[in-house]
Amino acid sequence: DVKVTQSSRYLVKRTGEKVFLECVQDMDHENMFWYRQDPGLGLRLIYFSYDVKMKEKGDIPEGYSVSREKKERFSLILESASTNQTSMYLCASSYPGTSGNFYEQFFGPGTRLTVL
Amino acid sequence: DQQVKQNSPSLSVQEGRISILNCDYTNSMFDYFLWYKKYPAEGPTFLISISSIKDKNEDGRFTVFLNKSAKHLSLHIVPSQPGDSAVYFCAASGSSYDKVIFGPGTSLSVIP
């Protein structure tokens, strides 16, 4: 079974703090993703990575950065947390699809981040 | 503007009856569609998919129908069970795309 784990289920941070969200997958997947889920908006892609040290911006990268130093680990960084970054953060991984598509993704359980 | 739309935020169905979840998309370049199911406090899990070269794909109690001319797909669950109560996300991608686009989700409640 594919396992995607996230470092924390719940986090509470203060405005202006630097926040690190960690994600680890154990299936040797090339592709990894960070999404945020908000009511009525579904899952919105923040960043994704298709290889070690490679990263691509998703639909809402502002205020976030990522790091992928090892194949199994993909970190999301909030440089200076703000209240509008309060959300559910979901990490996912997948094999590379044909023509560079990312189809069936395996998700972690999510991190509920609250920024006060 | 959302490229993948699920216009019903919620749906309630009696146990044993059919659940029909609908999804519309605007981008004609999409050629692969997926449904994910999400329980509270868990990540989404892949349920079923369909390629644009097909109009139907079936997996047990779950069937997805695709109407390309209408840019519409639907997920049928027959018979519905209480354990099917979850949020269902429709998603789309394509050979000219480098990411999967998710809809806002529909919360399904199956009433015993």
Image (cartoon, helix red, strand yellow):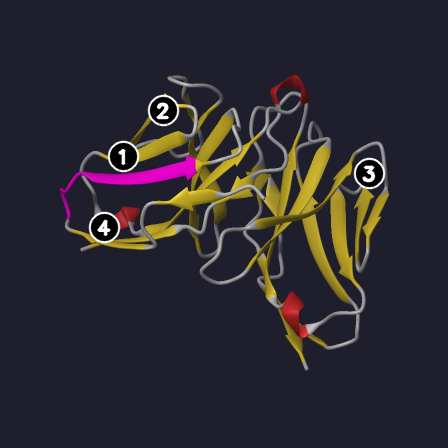
Which of A1/B1 is in front? A1
Q: CA distance from mark 4 to mark 2?
A: 26 Å
Q: Which residue is mark 3?
A: B69
Q: Which residues are magenta?
A: A15-24
Q: Chain of mark 4?
A: A
Q: Which residue is mark 1?
A: A77
Residue at 38% x, 31% y is A74
| Image side of residue A3 versus residue B54, left or right | left
Which of A102/B3 is in front? A102
Judge if badges 2 and 3 mark residues of a common chain.
no
Rendering coords of residue B30 (x, y %) = 69, 31
Which of B103/B39 is in front? B39
Rendering coords of residue A88 (x, y %) = 38, 51
Q: Amino acid at mark 2?
A: Arg
Residue A100 vs A79, above or below: the answer is above
Q: Chain of mark 1?
A: A
Which mark is first along the chain, 1 or 2? 2
Which of pointers 2 and 1 indicates the residue nearer the eye? 2
Q: Residues within 10 Å of mark 3 (few under 14, many from 20)?
A: few
Q: Chain of mark 3?
A: B
Q: CA distance from mark 2 to mark 3?
A: 41 Å
Q: Residues within 10 Å of mark 2 (few under 14, many from 20)?
A: many
Q: Which mark is residue A68?
A: 2
Q: Which residue is mark 4?
A: A83
Q: Amino acid at mark 3?
A: Ser
Q: Chain of mark 2?
A: A
Q: Which mark is residue B98?
A: none
Which mark is first along the chain, 2 or 4? 2
